[in-house]
Amino acid sequence: MTAERFTAVFTGFFTGKESGEYLYLTMSEDPECSGTLSRGRPPYELLGREIAFGDLPRGCRRLILDTYERLWNL
């Protein structure tokens, strides 16, 4: 079992979005960077300090880009 280390919040329009609601991806720091996509308001305890995309582990950057492409059919 791995702990969630990073949270990426996707902003922008998506079908059925309500005010204050976002898609967010919680990710572990393991080499494969497993993650879980959720919808709603990210729990406050999941949000720490903001870091640059480039400072994320390579696996997490790839997971975020893959998720983004899938969400917006790119």
Image (cartoon, rainbow, N blue to C red):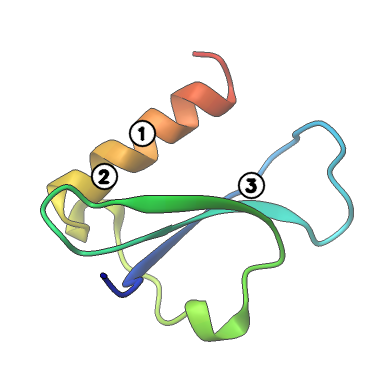
Q: Amino acid at mark 2?
A: Arg
Dot 2: element? helix
Q: Nearer the viewer, residue 9 or 63?
A: 63
The quarter of the picture where residue 26 lies is: bottom left
Residue at the (26%, 49%) spot, across then down: 60
Nearest the camera: 1 or 17?
1
Residue 11 as seen in the image, left or right of residue 29 = right
Q: Nearer the viewer, residue 2 or 58?
A: 2
**Residue 23: % across, % down:** 63, 49
Given the image, on which type of amino acid does mark 3 rest?
Answer: Thr
First in sequence, mark 1 or 3: give its number: 3
Q: Is residue 31 above or below residue 6?
A: above
- Residue drawn at x 47%, y 32% as measured from the top left: 68
Disc 1 designates what residue? 65
The residue tagged with tag 3: helix, strand or loop? loop
Residue 55 spot, x, y in % from top left: 19, 60
Q: Position of residue 45 (x, y in %)?
A: 53, 86
* Pointer 3 residue: 11
The answer to whether mark 2 and mark 1 are in CB contact below 8 A is yes
In the image, what residue occupies the spot 60% across and 83% down?
Answer: 44
Real-space CA distance between mark 2 and mark 3, rounded to the nearest whole angstrom = 17 Å
